[in-house]
Amino acid sequence: MIQLKNYREIDMIRKSGKVLAECLLSLDEVISEGISTYDIDRIAHEFIVKHHGYPSCLGYCGYPNATCTSVNEVVIHGIPSKKKILKDGDIISVDICVTLDGFVSDSTRTYEVGKVSDEVHKLNVVTRECLYKGIDAARQPHARLSEIGKAVFKHAFTDNGYGVVRDYTGHGVGFSVHEEPEVANFVSPMLPNPRLKPGMVLAIEPMINMGTWKVIDLKDGWTVVTADGKPACHWEHTVAVTENGIEILTEL
């Protein structure tokens, strides 16, 4: 069941989203060659707590850290590690959820470390564009959920030839980390396709691969990598459907 949020509840998610947006922005200053994903996680954790929030990923279904740090071919759910040291040319997606006064926001950004290849930079740019094309599709009058996936898939696959991950999707968010509905980055008759209505709060999150759309779940029970070992990018915002249209809650 889709849980609609009232004005006050959306405002509380907005406040959570502001902390999250500021946290991701602050990582611009620390993500560089030589830092470990463990230290990135520690810095983000400390930032969230300093701003009176809680890193919602920590302990969620047993997840061991505050953030997901996914490097290069890791699509999502990369576990921070002292052994994983960033190198020049890497990309890293940092996925964070923040709970503030009981309300949850969710956002992801892919950072480039030093000088990345032109191919990898293009993948990152296109994935970010996919996010905003999905958001723009949701702004259309009387839009249905599938319009988001249609816009993402067209830009990623039809226009640029990239693989669009199908095993994992966006989702509702706000009262908890994962809620209904699924927000797919493709269109399928098997998925529910409700019309967007005020009170919906959605995490829209394109996960786009340079090669195949297929992924592999590793034995640690969390890490998801591309099946062909090629790089992946991931961008995400929490958005609210309001009487006045779509509002991005995790953007400054």
Image (cartoon, rainbow, N blue to C red):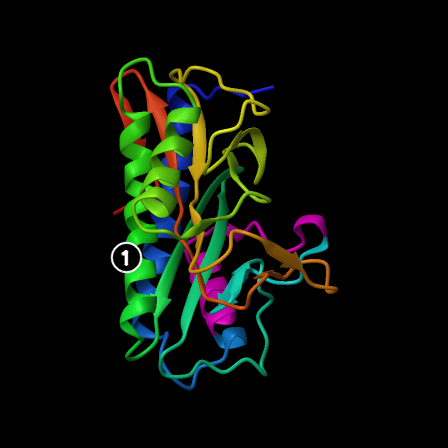
Is residue 52 highlighted in magenta? yes
- Compare residues 158 and 188 and report the one nearer the observer: 158
Magenta region, residue range = 40-61
Q: Amino acid at mark 1?
A: Val
Let me know if residue 27 appears in the view. no
Local secondary structure at mark 1: helix
Residue 179 appears left or right of 95: right
Dot 1, crowdedness within 10 Å: few (<14), some or many (≥20)? few
Residue at figure coordinates x 72%, y 58% from the top left: 221
Residue 231 appears left or right of 241: right
Q: Give the residue pinned by disc 1.
A: 125
Q: Position of residue 204 (x, y in %)?
A: 42, 39
Q: Residue furthest bottom?
A: 34
**Is 201 drawn above or below residue 110 in the view shown?**
above
Let me know if residue 99 appears in the view. yes
Q: Position of residue 151 (x, y in %)?
A: 34, 34
Q: Position of residue 165 (x, y in %)?
A: 51, 47
Q: Position of residue 197 (x, y in %)?
A: 40, 15
Residue 14 appears left or right of 42: left
Residue 216 appears left or right of 38: right
